[in-house]
Image: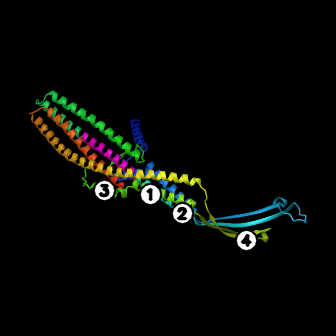
Amino acid sequence: MKYRIRTAVFLLSAGLAGALLAVMTAPAQQAPVRLTLEDAIHRALEANLSVLEARTRAEEDQGTEARSQAALLPRVSAQTYANYQNRDLRAFGISVPGLPLPNVVGPFSNYDFRIYAQQNLLDLGSLHTLRASQRALDADRLTEQDARDLIVRVAASLYLNAQSAEARTQAAQSRVTDSATLLKLAQDRHDAGTATGVDVLRAQVQLANDKQVLLEDGNQFKQSLLELARNLGMSPGTPLELAEPLRYLSLDQPAPDALVTSALISRADYESLATQRETLLEQQRANRARFYPKVSINGNVGELGRSIGGVATTGLIQGQIDFTIFDRDREGEAQQLAARLRRIDDQIDDLRRGVDEDIRAALLNLDSAAQQVEVAVEGQGLAKRELQEAQDRFQAGTANNVEVVTAQDELARAEENYILAVSSHVDAKYALARALGDTEKNIRKFAGNP
C-alpha cells in the first residue's frame, strides 16, 4: 500500500514538473501590434527603399556642392624636399669663351621647405557652377519630399484596404450569427410542427454559404495585413491589429481653381522641376562664363639652401589672368543644356496640367462617393427593415423562410455597397491629399486626426 502511494506521489510530481517545464519552454505568443494610420505612415517612411534612395541622393549632392565651393576658396599646400645631384653644364648651354669649364659639376645638395597658396579672385564660371550645385541640392531635397508624399499615399491606401477587408469580415461574421439564429428558429418551428423540413434545409444552406463567405473574407483580411506589414518594413508574420476601423467622415467640397493654385506651391514634384530649371539656367551661365577671363593670385614662401643650417627665406607672389580663346567643348555643352531646358519646360507644363486633372478627378470622385454613401445608408436601413419583417412573418408562421433568406442576401448586398462607398470616399480623400501636396499633413486632417 505504501509503495503504491509513493509511486502515485512520484508520478504526480513528475507530471506536474513536466507540465511546468512545458509551460516555461513553450514559445511566448507574440502580442499583436496595434497599428494606427499615423503609425503605418511613420513606419513606411522609415523603411521604404525609395525614400532611403532619395535621401542618399540629397546627401551625395551635398558633397557635390562642397566640391564646387572649393574652386572659390584658397588652396594651400606644403612641400619639402632634399636632393643630392650633379649637373651637365654643356647640356644646359652654359659655357664661357676662353675659359675651360668642366662638363659636369657637383655633386651638391639642395634643401627646400615651402608653402604654396592660390586664390581665385574672379572666376564667374566656378561661381555659377556652385550656384547650380546648390539648386541641384534643393531639387533633390524636394524629390525626397515627393518620394515621401508618394509613400504616404501608398501606406494610407494599404491601411484602407485592410480596413475594408476587416469591415467585410465583420459583416460576414454578423451574417453567420443571423443565419445561425434563423436555423435555430427553423429547427424549433419544425419540432413544433409549424415548419417543414425544407425550411430547416434552406436555413442550413444559407448558414453554410455565409460561413464560406466568412472564410473567404477572413483570408482576404489576413492577406491585406501581410501586404501592409511587408510595406511597413515589418516581418510579414508580425500579428497586426488595426486601431482605426473604416468610417465615413464628410468633407466640404472646395473650389477646384483655388486648390490648383495652392497645389502648385505645395507640390514637391512641381517645385523640384522648377528648381531643376533654375539649375540648368545657372549651368548655362557657367557655360557662357567659360570665355570670361579668370583672375587669380598665387605665391609661395619657404626656406631654401645648400644645407639645412644655411637655408634662407625665399618667396614669390604673382597675379595671373587666364583667357580662353578657342573651346569647342563649350558649344556642345551649350547645345546639351538648351535641349535639357526645353525638356524640363515641357515636363513642367505637363505636370501643371496633371495636377489640375488630379485635383478635379479627386473632387469628382469625392462628390460621387459621398452620394453613394448616402444611398448605401438608405439601402442598409431598408434591407434591415425587410429582414426584420421577414423574420417576424416566419416566426409568426404566416410565411416560410424564403423571404428571410432573400432579405439576408439583400442586406449582405447593401452592406457591401456601404463598404465600397465608404472605401471609395476615403480613397478619394487620400487622392486629393496627394494631389494637393504636403500629403502627410492633409491625410491626417482628412482622416480626422489633427
Q: Residue 146, position in %: x, y?
A: 41, 53
- Taking 8 as reference, is 71 above or below it? below
* Crowd tier of the residue under label 1, counting other residues whose Cα lies within 10 Å: few below 14, some 14–19, many 20 or above: many
- Taking 223 as reference, is 351 above or below it? below
The secondary structure making up most of the magenta span is helix
Residue on which disc 2 sits? 127
Q: Secondary structure at mark 1?
A: helix
Q: CA distance from mark 1 to mark 4?
A: 50 Å
Q: What amino acid does circle 3 point to?
A: Leu
Q: Secondary structure at mark 4?
A: strand
Residue on which disc 3 sits? 259
Q: What amino acid does circle 2 point to?
A: Leu
The span shown in magenta is: 147-172
Decide if residue 147 is in sight here: no
* Crowd tier of the residue under label 3, counting other residues whose Cα lies within 10 Å: few below 14, some 14–19, many 20 or above: some
Mark 3 / mark 2, whichever is N-terminal: 2
Q: CA distance from mark 2 to mark 4?
A: 33 Å
Q: CA distance from mark 2 to mark 1?
A: 18 Å
Q: What amino acid does circle 1 point to?
A: Thr
- What's the mark number on residue 275? 1
Q: Residue 269, position in %: x, y?
A: 40, 53
Q: Residue 48, position in %: x, y?
A: 43, 49
Mark 2 / mark 1, whichever is N-terminal: 2
Q: Residue 272, position in %: x, y?
A: 43, 55
Residue 279 in magenta stretch: no
Decide if residue 295 is in sight here: yes
Mark 3 / mark 1, whichever is N-terminal: 3
Q: Secondary structure at mark 3?
A: helix
Residue on which disc 4 sits? 314
Q: CA distance from mark 3 to mark 2?
A: 38 Å
The label nearer to you, 3 versus 2, is 2
